[in-house]
Image (spheres, rainbow, N blue to C red):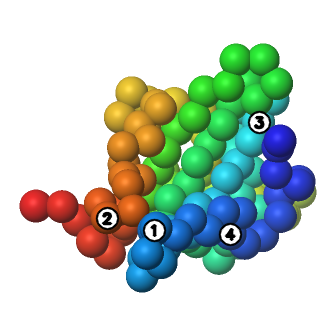
Amino acid sequence: MPTSRNARGIDIIAYSTDSPRFVKVQVKTLSKRNPVPLGAKLNNIMGDFWVIVINVSQEPCAFIMLPSEVTESVHRGEKDGRVSYWLQPSAYDKDVFREKWERIGHSDNVVTDGERRS
């Protein structure tokens, strides 16, 4: 089921089987390959992972990104004096992110922005 509008905050919290580790996931769903709206401020880029799902009602395709990767790719728009931020499809629709669920890992093998595998 698609997430509710552009709700601010974490959408999914996943715990390991013995509960010492957890992962916070922000999910953005789109009906087609469109820019992801990020709002007027960038303080909503949070969590350990971002999952962007396009074509949600027909043939869903997910892109798994780190918040730092989202931040690095932000597009700033301005219209009528109002600033808004977007993640363009060319920024997320890449093979390096496409269906890369292994980036999230398993309960004992999770990699976040703060913990890079060697």
Amino acid on which disc 1 is placed: Ser
- Pair 3/4: label in front: 4
Mark toward the start of the polypeptide (4 vs 2)? 4
Residue at the farthest left position: 118
- Pair 4/2: label in front: 2
The residues bearing labels 3 and 4 have C-alpha atoms spaced at a distance of 17 Å
Which residue corresponds to mark 3? 30
Residue 53, position in %: x, y? 66, 37
Element type at marker 3? loop
Check whether the beta carbons of the residues at disc 1 and disc 2 lie within 8 A of each other: yes
Which residue corresponds to mark 1? 16
Element type at marker 1? loop
Mark toward the start of the polypeptide (1 vs 4)? 4
Badge 2: few (under 14), some or many (20 or more) residues near its Cα, within 10 Å? few
The residues bearing labels 3 and 2 have C-alpha atoms spaced at a distance of 31 Å
Badge 4: few (under 14), some or many (20 or more) residues near its Cα, within 10 Å? some
Mark toward the start of the polypeptide (1 vs 3)? 1
Amino acid on which disc 4 is placed: Ile
Check whether the beta carbons of the residues at disc 3 and disc 2 lie within 8 A of each other: no
Asked if residue 53 is positioned above or below residue 42 in the image, the reply reads above
Amino acid on which disc 2 is placed: Asp
Which residue corresponds to mark 4? 10
In the shown orientation, is residue 63 left or right of residue 115? right
Residue 37, position in %: x, y? 74, 51
Q: Residue at x 36, y 43 (%)?
A: 102
Amino acid on which disc 3 is placed: Leu
- Pair 1/4: label in front: 1
Which residue corresponds to mark 2? 108
In the shown orientation, is residue 36 left or right of residue 108? right
Q: Dividing the image into 4 quarters, which one contains the N terminus?
A: top right
The residues bearing labels 1 and 3 have C-alpha atoms spaced at a distance of 28 Å
Element type at marker 4? loop
